[in-house]
Image (tube, rainbow, N blue to C red):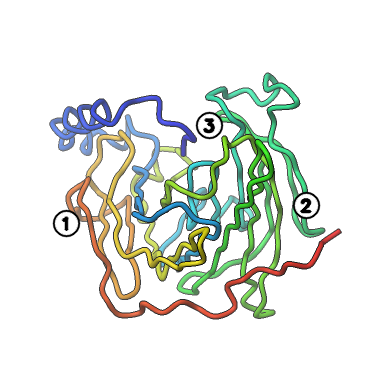
Amino acid sequence: MKNRSQWTIPAVILVMVLAAGFVNAAEKKAPKTIRAARSVHLGYKAPEGVLFYNEVAVEQSQKGTYFCACGFLHGYFGIQERNNDKVVIFSIWDPGNQNNPNVVEEEKRVKLLYKDPDVYTGRFGNEGTGGQSFLKYDWKPNQTYRFLVQAVVRGDRTEFSGYFYMNEQQQWKHLVTFSTLANGDLLKGYYAFIEDFRRDVKSVREVRKAQFGNGWVKTPKGQWIALTQAQFTADGTPLMNINAGPVEGGFFLQTGGQTKNQTPLWSSMERLPSGLKLPQSLKPSTKKEK
């Protein structure tokens, strides 16, 4: 998932239109020519916020799949199934469009302000650069997992904190706080996605599906806004075995395998009215962690 689009929206649409003309041929050639299942996204409509809450329940996963629950302009937060384990990942980007983490000047890099002892942190590259954190966590299919991102502006930097709800302990775990140069931004540009990182050709034939639900954003004035509208988008991979749609309390995304496309790309969707209730225990701890 790129941190900055290098195309304008009209250019993206043009690519999608041209790609659509070759969908059938591309699908027939997929085992030989296309390495990954198509990435699919939900773009949420909501104002700038100080807190961003969302949930994900994975129905079908494959090795190498990342399920992003809380994506925003400066980072993303979700769960991944790797080859030998499962993790929670929270990442924040450096400013700029570079892909080599070593070329970023020290003063422009993401800074680590806090990490939980169970969390591993480091820098990443190749899809933008920035700070990344991992929590090893054996998440299960068909269970709901909760994510919360908090944003606080400090001068020319914004501090983004990631909180993951530990179902077993029934409490929030403050995983990490990163600081980045963000031009005074709080949280905005909200999205969720499913992405295939295995990219071994065989993965194109495998289904990945998840429900993203009960999302909320808290504005700087303290108002909670429910994420009831989302746009269905995808990357430029010329495959149409993708789908999305509203479900009770949220939306689903699906890609790969025998997935049938029923919702057109770029469609705006509205979630069903049931389940519009702000969960309890959303406010993260305000104590000073050391």
**Residue under the point 70% across and 58% down:** 175
Q: Position of residue 289 (x, y in %)?
A: 82, 61
Callout 3 touching callout 1 (CB < 8 Å): no
Whole-percent x, y for residue 270 in the image: 24, 64
Of callouts 2 and 3, the N-terminal one:
2
The x and y percentages for residue 138 are 63, 66
Circles 1, 2 touching at the beta carbon (< 8 Å): no
For the residue pair 208 and 276, the one nearer the viewer reads as 276
Which label's residue is closer to the chain start, 3 or 1? 3
Q: Residue 127 carries which label?
A: 3
Mark 3 or mark 1: which is in front? 3
Name the quadrant of the C terminus: bottom right
- Which quadrant holds residue 126? top right
**Residue, x 65% and y 54% (percent of image)?**
161
Q: Mark 1 points at which residue?
A: 262
- The kind of residue tagged 2 is Tyr
Callout 3: SS: loop
- List the single residue furthest toward the top: 103
Please name the residue shown 46% across and 39% down the image. Answer: 1
Q: How crowded is mark 1: few (under 14 residues within 10 Å), some or many (20 or more)?
A: few
Tell me the distance, in whole angstroms, between the alpha carbons under discs 2 and 3: 24 Å
Three-letter amino acid code at the position of disc 1: Gln
Residue farthest front in this picture: 221
Which amino acid type is marked by label 3?
A: Glu
Instruction: Determine the residue positioned at 21% across, 37% down.
Output: 28
Pick whichever, 10 or 50, lies toward us.
50
- For marks 3 and 1, give the CA distance: 30 Å
Q: How far apart are marks 1 and 2 (CA)?
A: 44 Å
User: Compared with residue 169, is residue 191 higher up or lower down, i.e. above or below?
Assistant: above
Q: Mark 2 points at which residue?
A: 114
Label 3 neighbourhood size at 10 Å, few (<14), some (14-19), many (20+)?
some
